[in-house]
Amino acid sequence: MSRDRCSGKAVEVPFDAAADDRALNAFAGWCLRYGPATAVERSPGPAAVCVNVRGCEGVHGGWGRLLQRVQRDMDRLGLHASGAVAGGAAASLVAAAHHSWQVIQDHGEWLDQAPLDSLRLSPQVPVALAEVGVRTIGQMRRLGAQALADRFGEGPWHRLQLALGQATEGMTSVVPQGPLRCALAFDGPTARPEALQQGVQSCLQRLVHRLRRRCLGSLHVRVQLRRASAAPTRLEWRLARPSRGLRHLWRLMQPDLERVHLGHDPAEGIEAVQVTSLRHVSMAPGQAELLHGSVESQGPSWAEWIDRVRQRLGGVSLRVPHAQADPDQARAWAMRPMADAGAAAQAPMPSIEFLLPLRPTVRVAPPRAVEVACDARRRPVQVRLRGALQPVLAAEGPDRVEAAWWRGEQGTHDRWRVLADGAWWWLRRDGAAWWLEGAWT
Amino acid sequence: MQAIQQQVDAVLASGRVGVPSPIPAGNAGPMQVGWPALQGADLPWHGVHEAFGALDAAALRLPAMSMALHLAWRAVMQAPSPHRVLWVGRHAWPHPRALLGSLRGLRGGWRQRLDARLWHASVFVDAGGLVDRLWATEMSLQAPGAVLVVADGAGLNLTATRRLQLAATACPVLLLRPAHEAASPSAAIIRWRVQAGTHQDQPAWTARAVRVRSGLPPAWLDAAVSWDAWWERGSDAVAWEGILPRVNTMDRPQHPMESEHGTHAGDPAAVVARRPGDPIAPPAGGLAA
């Protein structure tokens, strides 16, 4: 649920984890005005961006003035944000939650007084610790590493060490660079596919070399073919995960390049090729890459498999299950397109109370109208399946659900699970109409 | 010459020479599917398997999803991580709720918890036409970490299933086929006919092996297995588990649906199913197979 800025009314916006992640990355890029490196914080908790401002005090005229500027900018953007300056990223996150808009100069007692929630642990850890009276970071510190690790693993103690500045912090910085281009101009227009493929391969090799040197991986590649007497041809590929694998990228490009019409007359052919990485993110070098110059010596990866399927079947051909608390079954249980690289893998699930009720193994989409005869108590007694009225041997229901009033929908739906014709069926009643929504097959 | 003879003897002794089996040996070992009717043997975890839903019809596709879910849960529970189950074709997509199991255990109190292993392992491939579906199924068999591919097998001919049989070496593909294709030729190593029913007022299913290729135990032919959906009755176990050995042939009146779809002569599924509402119980005579 969000609020329309123009009308001030509440509007329903479906949660999109991938779009959320893209927006957060863009915001982290925007924050580069405060410091030379920014990163999106991935630990559990509210969305957060860390800015490395070490050594920038003089530029901003002091930490206090920097915080004032950030606060002013957030107000201007209409964002409800909190911020703080502290010794490290993890400490800053605790300070932002507990001492908002303050400069923390030391790792002193303030951290011990901070609540556990501000440490951005997995949600069940603070709940479990609160049951035994541990509510602040100081109390958790006194438990010791071993006691915490026995119950919750290494994660919580490591998080505490990060906040105390006693463990090394790594930041996956947002890369602010623009597109990377490599181009090649032929001596004259060519209509030979071998020449075109060799030219693109040459550009791609140089592009991969530049990406590797900068520790980047491309997420969006474009090949532009400039023609002598026609509009240029553009081919684009979006990748599931950042890649700088020459073989991976070439395997994606080759089928599309083979389909490019090169013209009947050599004079109308291709004059120049340009390979551009339009979007790239930081990517750590792999051991195999350092030794052999390629990361693809161990067969196709999951990312490469995704790219090959998407290339043939389309960008939304791969999906993952999605659940959200909604009275509309189609919205509650859906198949969403698989998220892009770096995005949160899946949306958080609703509560177990919503997820547990029985649902059919197969959904009938769209629902089909069925004829149902009811008794005096409006319980189904006969249902027409496969052309014949079948007696209902057992019926469970009604499972009554109110429509989504916030979307302007009205009324209620009754759902029944009925045993007829040798199987269980999932029926919905809207007033006098009955619909077959699924079955246990 | 003597050295060559010794090498030949060694090869013969190792048992690597013989009549080649039409069923290629899979990279993965057999899978424990918890079906005692298979007489202690485990299901070969490679090659093409087929399942026909008895409720399935041309007008309304209701594939034998419960068998796919049962095998998927088994695969996810036994395979090392990371693992993936790929569902190819919209008709082979289950209701997402069926991908969630429930756990009930001492840890965290006697509260129900979700088991989302299959949920997180599942990837759905939206492939429309027959050619794209076949290509996507073959690609899915090559996906890294794939432990099971469930595909909509409608319209696949013998050549297509042979092609899949050759590709399915690392993990099996379960083809969910419509009932009216039950007589079509196929290279599948095992073919099941799944009958939906009920047990103790809960959905339950019985499947019968109606075709078993050579290389598998002959006793499997006509073997019947059953399982049910223990969604909300689990005890320290994944809720969706069909492990109960209550199976078998029993005499009952012919089901109306069987005559409608015309199961072919000799198909044991035509005479095996329960009367709706009857409990599934082992017969007095033991296993018929």
Image (cartoon, coloured by chain):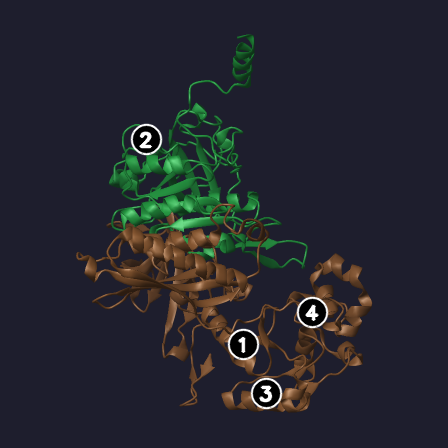
Chain colours: A brown, B green
Number of numbered callouts drawn: 4
**According to the image, label 3 marks what residue?**
A70
Q: Tell me the element at label 4.
A: helix
**According to the image, label 4 marks what residue?**
A126
Q: CA distance from mark 1 to mark 4?
A: 28 Å
Q: Tell me the element at label 2.
A: loop
Residue B249 vertical placement versus A384 (above, below):
above
- Pick whichever of labels 1 and 4 is earlier in the sequence: 1
**Label 1: chain?**
A
**Label 2: chain?**
B
Q: Label for residue A28? A: 1
Q: Tell me the element at label 3.
A: helix
The answer to whether residue A63 is visible is yes
**According to the image, label 2 marks what residue?**
B267
- Residue B217 is situated, as x and y percent measured from the top left of the image, at 46, 25
User: Do discs 1 and 3 share a chain?
Assistant: yes
**Label 4: chain?**
A
Q: How many residues crowd mark 1 within 10 Å: few (<14), some (14–19), many (20+)? A: many
Q: CA distance from mark 4 to mark 3?
A: 30 Å
Identify which residue, B153 or A131, lies in the foreground. Answer: B153
Q: Residue at x 26, y 54 (%)?
A: A259
Q: CA distance from mark 1 to mark 2?
A: 64 Å
Circle 2: residue type: Asp
On the image, which quarter does residue A436 sit in? bottom left
